[in-house]
Amino acid sequence: MPVPDHDADEKIVWQGKYITAKTRGRWEYVGRPRNIRAAVILAVDEDDHVLLVEQYRVPLGRPCIELPAGLIGDEADFEGEDPLVAAGRELVEETGYRADVLEDLGTFWSSPGMVSESFTLVRASQLAKVGEGGGVGGENITVHRVALSDIAAFTAAKRADGCGIDVRVLMLLGQGILAGE
């Protein structure tokens, strides 16, 4: 069965520093310019606590609870950066924790019907507190260290407080990935 528009020419409608709006046939979608991708970090310590971050997100108009994450290759200093190196850097910047072990869990797409951006999911372990975190450049990130057994209650409380919840937090509710299953 043929896929509509799969072979139509891709056209750039608008391009900013971090986002490119495109069309392909009747499809409209966004992506990242210059092969920019993201690294998303699943950081669990030896006491079975996960590191989450809370950051105001302008598109949502509210703070959002997320796994620590950051862009790969978004700045000239980081062009060609390895996803694991980017994940390690972003983990320290956002949470103040360093991981002795970083494991690539694969490439994923969060909303493939409208966004072409991919992210590498990285498991971080053997964590050590090395700083305050909070991000860079006015990101104003709040770090939450949450017991895995309390994820559902924490998420519900944050949602009731008006926070958005990133879709990747869903995997914590199943916890199978945390055990390496």
Image: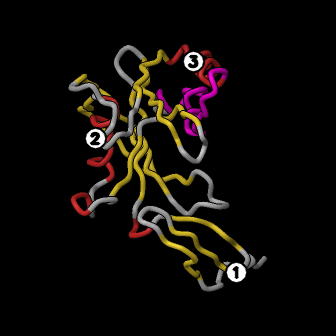
**Mark in front: 2 vs 1:** 1
Q: Quadrant of the N terminus?
A: bottom right
The quarter holding residue 174 reads top right
Q: Secondary structure beneath disc 1? A: loop
Count of numbered marks: 3
Residue 88, label in figure: 2
Q: Which residue is mark 3?
A: 154
Which of the two labelled residues, at mark 2 and mark 1, occupies the earlier sequence position?
Answer: 1
Mark 3 to mark 2: distance in Å?
25 Å
Location of residue 124 with respect to 12 vertically, above or below: above
Location of residue 83 with respect to 122 vertically, above or below: below
* Left or right of 14 on screen, residue 111: right
The quarter holding residue 144 reads top left
Other residues around mark 1 within 10 Å, as few (<14) / some (14–19) / many (≥20): some
Name the residue rendered at 73%, 77% in the picture. Answer: 26
- The image position of residue 160, as x and y in percent, is 67, 21
Name the residue rendered at 38%, 14% in the picture. Answer: 47
- The image position of residue 149, as x and y in percent, is 54, 14
Name the residue rendered at 50%, 18% in the picture. Answer: 148
Which amino acid, mark 2?
Answer: Gly
Q: Secondary structure beneath disc 3? A: helix
Which of the two labelled residues, at mark 3 and mark 2, occupies the earlier sequence position?
Answer: 2
Which amino acid, mark 1?
Answer: Gly
Magenta part of the chain:
160-178
Residue 25, label in figure: 1
Is 85 a magenta residue?
A: no
Which amino acid, mark 3?
Answer: Phe
Location of residue 117 with respect to 171 vertically, above or below: below
